[in-house]
Image (cartoon, helix red, strand yellow):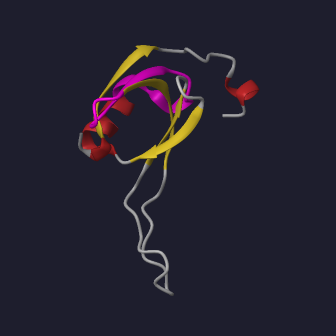
């Protein structure tokens, strides 16, 4: 999916509270349930050349594997909002 499609999905479901359960379908066909955490800012190349720079990335927490992942929007085939408010009231307990 494009960055614009990803952004439109975030806006459509108002996912800014990091509490909605989403289905994440990766381009490799794998399917995960998780929450979207944040976008990283795009990073430019470092002055010493050791860091080549990266485009904006998306951070997710995946419930099925109990881990955080960082993917670009282009790594995703599609997203689906499964349940709004899934973590309602639990956000601070989980340290998210």
**Magenta residues?**
12-30
Left or right, 13 with respect to 74, comes to: right
Q: Quadrant of residue 22?
A: top left
Residue 48 vertical placement versus 45 (above, below): below
Q: Residue lying furthest right in this view?
A: 93
- In the rendered image, residue 58, in percent from the top left (x then y), is placed at 44, 45
Is 91 within the magenta? no
Q: Residue at x 71, y 28 (%)?
A: 94
Q: Residue at x 54, y 15 (%)?
A: 85
Residue 70 vertical placement versus 86 (above, below): below
Q: Quadrant of residue 75?
A: top left
- In the rendered image, residue 38, in percent from the top left (x then y), is placed at 51, 42
- In the rendered image, residue 49, in percent from the top left (x then y), is placed at 46, 84
Left or right, 41 with respect to 95, comes to: left
For the N terminus, the quadrant is top left
Left or right, 19 with respect to 91, comes to: left
How many numbered badges does the structure rendering display?
0
Q: Quadrant of residue 68?
A: top right
Is 28 within the magenta? yes
For the C terminus, the quadrant is top right
């Amino acid at each position: 999916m494009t960055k614009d499609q990803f952004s439109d999905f975030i806006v459509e479901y108002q996912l800014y509270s990091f509490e909605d359960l989403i289905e994440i379908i990766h381009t490799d066909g794998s399917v995960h349930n998780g929450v979207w955490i944040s976008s990283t800012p795009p990073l430019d190349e470092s002055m010493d050349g050791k860091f080549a720079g990266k485009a904006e990335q998306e951070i997710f927490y995946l419930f099925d594997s109990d881990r955080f992942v960082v993917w670009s929007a282009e790594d995703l085939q599609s997203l689906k909002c499964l349940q709004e408010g899934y973590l309602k009231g639990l956000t601070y307990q989980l340290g998210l």
